[in-house]
Image: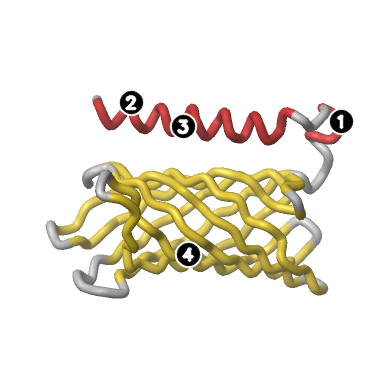
Amino acid sequence: MKYMKIVLAGLVAATLLTTTALAATTNETLFQPDQWTMSLAGSGTIQTESPSDAAIGATLSLGRKVQVVIPSELGVRQTVAWADVNQGSTWAFNTTLYNDWRIVKVGNVEILAGARIGTTYGNTPMTWAGGPEAEVRLWMKKDVYTFVRGAYDFAFSNSGINSKDAVTLTVGVGFSF
């Protein structure tokens, strides 16, 4: 029950963050075409140091294009993963907030870089992590793209911020609407 309260508090915080970011937007601009993105992807995480924990999963994300100094995308991702850790294999869930800035767009290729923060929970102890990420999108049509995203996480705990020595690679397809 304690963890459920923390998860609910995180979801409320994510909702407030998204609402605050969209509050300055009028209804006329809120639902303009190509302002929202949704993606479905497969992801994998591997430890770069011992122990060699690994996880694979599926990720669903919802984002909104906003202007934060430069064009960016602000959103939330939900991942369901199977993890092989020292204690054995287990299922885990991850809810992540992200903000990625568009660095460059040349033709059909778009490069984004930013940061993410989120929590992992499920049949494992709840942990918080965040860090930098970069994404390359190849637009297949005006509203459909494929992408590859790489991320490196740092764990947040009572003892401070520590490197998780883990790299996550995500490959998927996205839609703009």
The residue at which mark 2 appears reads as 5
136 on left or right of 142:
left
- First reached walking from the N terminus: tag 3 or tag 1: 3
What whole-number distance in Å separates the C-alpha atoms at marks 1 and 4?
35 Å
> Alpha carbon of mark 2 to alpha carbon of mark 3: how far?
10 Å
The residue singled out by tag 4 in the image is 151
Q: What residue occupies the far right of the structure in this picture?
A: 28
Residue located beneath label 3 in the image? 11
Q: CA distance from mark 2 to mark 4?
A: 27 Å
Q: CA distance from mark 3 to mark 4?
A: 22 Å
Residue 99 - label: none
User: What's the CA distance linking mark 2 and mark 1?
Assistant: 36 Å
N-term-proximal mark, 2 vs 1? 2
**Few, some or many C-alpha atoms within 10 Å of disc 4 (few <14, some 14-19, many ≥20)?**
many
Residue in the image at 43% along x and 53% along y: 130
* Residue 103 in the image, given as x and y percentages of width and height: 71, 66
Residue type marked 4:
Ala
The answer to whether 165 is drawn above or below residue 60 in the figure is: below
